[in-house]
Amino acid sequence: MALWLEGRVADSQCWYSQRNHTAELIPAIQALFERSSSHLEEIQGIAVALGPGGFSALRVGISAAKGLALTKSTPLVGVGTLELEAYPFAGLGLPVCALLDAGREEIATGAFGNATGSWTRLKEERVCTLEELVESTGEPTLFCGEGAPNRSQELRRLLGRNGLVIGLHSPAGRLWALAELGSKRLDRGQASPMDALQPMYLRRPSIGAPKSHQRIKQ
C-alpha cells in the first residue's frame, strides 16, 4: 500500500502475507494514515491492483478498496498487475513484457510500451508457457516482473539479443507504479464503475466440488 501526495509517494509499505490478508491490511492502512497525519476524508482517489494474483489476496484487496471508496464516494480506479510490473521501464524505448508465475509451469504475461507515443498495451494479458511466449516474440523485448528472474537464463538462451531480462524484482516497484498510474488516470476522469471492478484472474481458481471416486465401469 502507498500514499500518493503532491506528485510523489509520501509513504509506502510492502509485506508478505500468507493467509491473514484482511486482518493485516486494515490495521496497516490505519497506521499509514496515522504516520502521515492524514484522514480517509481527505483522500481524493483510490487505486487498486486487479491481478492476476492470488485468489484470496485479490478479493481482499479489491473489497477493501471498494469499502474505502464507498465511505465517501471516492473515485476508484483499477490497474492490472502485469501493467504495474512493466510501467517502471516505460522510458527505455523497448516493448516491455511482464511475467508472473501462474502455476502448472505456465506464466501470466502482457506486453506494454510507447509504440503510439504514449504508454499503451501492446499485447493482451494471457496465460501461456514460456515456449509459447518465445514463439510470439519477434523483436528486442525487455522482460521483467516477479516471474522473470527465475527464467532469465532460459529467455536469454532462447531469444539471444532479443531477450533483455531484468534479473531483480521488488514488489515496491509495482506499488509505486500503481500510485503514479492511478493518479494520472483519476486526474483524467478515468475512474472505474464500482460494479465493473473485478479481479483479473486469467484462469479459474483451482477450487471446485470434490471429485467423484466412483469406479468407472469398463
Image (cartoon, helix red, strand yellow):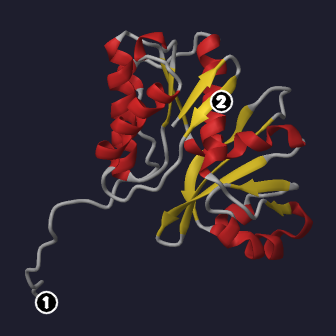
Question: For mark 2, what is the residue?
Answer: 9
Mark 2 and mark 1: Cα distance apart in space: 65 Å
Q: What kind of residue is marked 2? A: Val
| Above-or-below relation of 25 to 216 | above
Query: What residue sits 73% from the left and 65% below the top?
Result: 134
Snapshot quadrant of residue 40:
top left
x and y percent of residue 14 in the render?
53, 47
How crowded pointer 1 is (Cα within 10 Å; few <14, some 14-19, many 20+) is rated as few
In the picture, residue 30 is in which quadrant? top left
Q: Can you say whether 162 is above or below 198 in the image?
A: below
Q: Which mark is residue 184?
A: none
Q: Please, what secondary structure does the residue beneath circle 1 have?
A: loop
Figure label count: 2
- 74 left or right of 45? left
Which quadrant is the C terminus positioned in? bottom left
Q: Report crowding for label 2: few under 14, some 14 to 19, many 20 or more residues within 10 A (C-alpha).
A: some
The one of 90 and 118 positioned closer to us in this rendering: 90
Q: Is residue 34 above or below residue 106?
A: above
In the image, taking residue 44 as reference, residue 213 lies left or right, namely: left
Location of residue 74 in the rendering, given as x and y in whole percent from the top left corner: 43, 12
- Tell me what residue is drawn at x 49 percent, y 44 percent: 51
Q: Which residue is mark 1?
A: 218
Res. 141 image quadrant = bottom right
Tell me what residue is drawn at x 70 percent, y 25 percent: 8
The residue sitting at the bottom extreme is: 218
Q: Position of residue 173 (x, y in %)?
A: 67, 45
Q: Is residue 37 left or right of residue 155?
A: left
Q: Position of residue 100 (x, y in %)?
A: 58, 57
Residue type at mark 1 is Gln
